Amino acid sequence: MSNETKTPTNETQPAAEKPLLLEVTEAGAGIITLNRPEVHNAFDDNLISDLTDALKQVDEDPRVRLIVLRSNGKSFSAGADLNWMRRMADYSWDENYQDSLALATLMQSLHTSYKPTLGIVQGAAFGGGVGLVACCDMVIASEKALFSLSEVKLGLIPSVISPYVIEAIGKRQANRYFVTAERFDAQRAHQMGLVHEVVAADELENYANDFIKNILSNGPEAIKAAKLLIEVVTELGMGEELIRETAQRIADIRASAEGREGVTAFLEKRKPNWLK
């Protein structure tokens, strides 16, 4: 992915040493990169806090129209860091609750972002890593990616990620994979709805760049409104209230400056002003 404008999370720390990288491209992509390849991008309490803060930052940045979550190294995310788990073993119930609540807040922040989110999975995503994948609106995976809801192997459960994973793969598949902790490949993840596209490993970068470029060629306000529309339709269900709500939303968009510009540009066979 192109790194046109970089916004480091910590100016005093060399980029190679930062556990999390954040950059905003001139085109409007806010790219968040997990950067702990030496531990397979496993997360601990510090990374959870950093990632939550980064999501808030890009959500509030008016330059950003699409949030991209990716990782450096061989793995997307191996889930919980071993040293973090060792510390957790000595936690009290209250400490465990607060620790878990921080992870739950991270997942919710990613899932409920105002802006569309795209996950790019180049390798293994285990445990909480699957949660991050499930929380993204769209996911592109390498054919080499592997997935596992591995918590029960440690005598644990995928609790805080469960709402998002079940929404993505359905109760029937969750019945199996929450209990078996089996590993499954990218094609199986695609079949279940966890990922949207599976591409060859050597094509992942170019495919993702084209995918991002395509999204960012669309109306900035329309992109956000389209994401919100999905949530509203899902919550309301069919009925008179939904009919009126959807009619109001398209009327609002048609009457907006962006909506008028988009239609006019199409009729005049020119690019809309957000592409200039």
Image (cartoon, grey):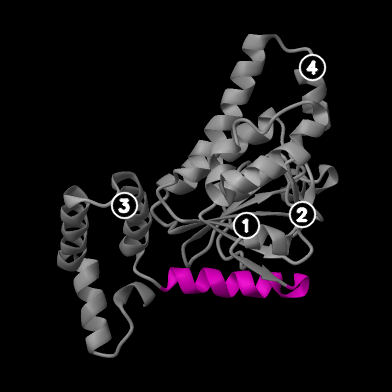
- Asked if disc 2 and disc 1 are in contact, CB closer than 8 Å, the reply is yes
Q: Which mark is residue 77?
A: none
How far separated are the C-alphas under marks 3 and 4?
43 Å
Residue under pointer 2 = 184
- Report the mark closest to the observer, 1 or 4: 1
| Residue 168 or residue 15, whichever sits in front | 168
Residue 215 falls within the magenta-colored stretch: yes
Q: Amino acid at mark 2?
A: Phe
Magenta residues span 200-217
- The secondary element bearing badge 2 is classed as strand
Which residue sits at x=67%, y=58%? 189
- The secondary element bearing badge 1 is classed as helix
The mark that comes first in sequence, 1 or 4, is 4
Q: Amino acid at mark 1?
A: Met
Which residue sits at x=64%, y=62%? 191
- Asked if disc 1 and disc 4 are in contact, CB closer than 8 Å, the reply is no
Residue under pointer 4 = 89
Residue under pointer 3 = 233
| Residue 170 or residue 75, whichever sits in front | 170
Q: Which mark is residue 192?
A: 1
The mark that comes first in sequence, 2 or 4, is 4
- Report the mark closest to the observer, 2 or 4: 2
- Residue 129: name its quadrant: top right
